[in-house]
Image (spheres, rainbow, N blue to C red):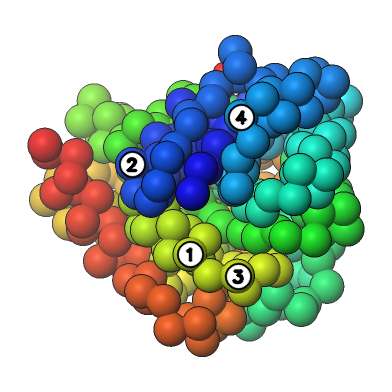
């Protein structure tokens, strides 16, 4: 089996490539730029993969509010070209999406299943939702995998690191940390997501999946757990999203129900706290 991975130099791509079985061809933006859709098909025609995994995305959640064209160019129109090429070459396309396709339902307090109606509240979320629909509509052999709050040892290129490292760095500088306590979600360790994705790809159970660590917390809870597990004293306080004042709106509740994946009998995802503990051990290496 031959698998081509787009976005292989990103946070998730780097953890996923070594966990895939068979031949893996790791592509970066220099090989295929999703924002230049005409270039995608020739590359895939030459490589003739069985599976394409798209870890590439425009991930600047705040910047997308003022440059929607750039977000849509990569997350929707580039993904459309990729889905069409995969369909025509008869290969499976695995594509990652986000919990930010939710948020419009402000009264929500129960995890979203794959059948729940999405409703994004940001340009980024909307561009990712468009990408999801394009994959699901155009490429019959697809896995669309929604995930949430990724952190991994490589850090996100788009975000210049990851939340855990930012917290530890700022606390190490002795500065106060004000972290939002009104966004409920599930931070997810990319190494665990990579293992689950690799397992899912061994099946032919195509479709839409939610894959995150188990459980839920707020970013403030997560920050508190980071400091507790790392044994670090920090000046941490809780604030609201309004007080934080980010340019893009985030969902107040975007916890994803991972029951559909679990029902396949594949290796379960551990709790966010156990995963965080494993990450903190891994980063020491
Ligand atoms: N990070 C999160 O918290 C989070 C949460 C939910 C869902 N997701 C989704 O999970 C997936 C992986 O995210 P990640 O955290 O691994 O992202 P990441 O670390 O920012 O990596 C994204 C990769 O995509 C590449 N890329 C960006 N624009 C491209 C383009 N036009 N053509 C080709 N490559 C391009 C980037 O290359 P350059 O380095 O050259 O820019 C980078 O290597 C994405 O679909 C994302 O939307 C992420």
Structural crowding at the residue carrying mark 2, measured as other residues with C-alpha within 10 Å and reported as few (<14), some (14–19) or many (≥20): few
Q: Residue furthest top?
A: 30
Q: Answer whether residue 29 is visible to the viewer in this image.
A: yes
Residue ID at (84%, 20%): 38
Q: Is residue 166 above or below residue 112?
A: above
* Disc nearer the start of the sequence (1/2): 2
Q: Is mark 1 within 8 Å of ligand 1?
A: no
Task: Say which of marks 2 and 3 sits in front.
Answer: 3
Q: Are discs 4 and 2 less than 8 Å apart at CB?
A: no
Q: Decide if residue 154 is on the left or right side of residue 278.
A: right
Q: Which residue is mark 3?
A: 204
* Disc nearer the start of the sequence (2/3): 2
Q: Which residue is mark 1?
A: 202
Residue ID at (43%, 84%): 265
CA distance separating discs 2 and 3: 21 Å
Residue 208 percent location from the top left of the image: 69, 67
Question: Residue 18 got which mark?
Answer: 2
Label 3 SS: loop
Q: Is residue 25 above or below residue 21?
A: above
The front one of 224 and 44 is 44
Label 1 SS: loop
Q: Are discs 3 and 1 less than 8 Å apart at CB?
A: no
CA distance separating discs 1 and 2: 15 Å
Quarter placement of the C terminus: top left
* Disc nearer the start of the sequence (4/1): 4
Q: Decide if residue 260 is on the left or right side of residue 8.
A: right
């Amino acid at each position: 089996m031959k698998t081509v991975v787009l976005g292989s130099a990103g946070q998730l791509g780097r953890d996923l490539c070594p966990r895939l079985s068979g031949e893996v061809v790791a592509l970066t933006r220099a090989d295929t730029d999703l924002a230049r859709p005409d270039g995608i098909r020739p590359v895939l025609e030459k490589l003739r993969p069985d599976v394409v995994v798209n870890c590439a995305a425009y991930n600047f959640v705040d910047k997308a509010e003022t440059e929607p064209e750039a977000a849509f160019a990569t997350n929707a129109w580039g993904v459309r070209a990729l889905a069409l090429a995969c369909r025509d070459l008869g290969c499976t396309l695995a594509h990652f999406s986000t919990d930010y396709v939710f948020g419009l339902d402000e009264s929500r307090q129960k995890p979203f299943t794959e059948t729940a109606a999405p409703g994004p509240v940001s340009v980024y979320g909307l561009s990712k939702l468009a990408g999801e629909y394009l994959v699901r509509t155009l490429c019959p052999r697809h896995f669309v995998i929604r995930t949430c709050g990724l952190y991994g040892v490589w850090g996100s290129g788009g975000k210049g690191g990851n939340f855990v490292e930012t917290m530890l760095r700022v606390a190490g500088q002795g500065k106060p940390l004000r972290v939002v306590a009104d966004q409920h979600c599930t931070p997810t360790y990319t190494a665990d997501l990579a293992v689950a994705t690799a397992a899912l790809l061994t099946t032919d159970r195509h479709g839409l999946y939610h894959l995150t660590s188990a459980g839920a917390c707020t970013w403030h809870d997560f920050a508190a757990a980071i400091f507790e597990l790392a044994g670090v004293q920090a000046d941490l306080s809780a604030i609201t999203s309004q007080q934080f004042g980010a340019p893009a709106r985030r969902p107040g509740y975007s916890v994803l129900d991972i029951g559909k994946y679990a029902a396949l009998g594949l290796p379960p995802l551990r709790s966010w706290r156990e995963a965080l503990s494993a990450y903190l051990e891994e980063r020491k290496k």
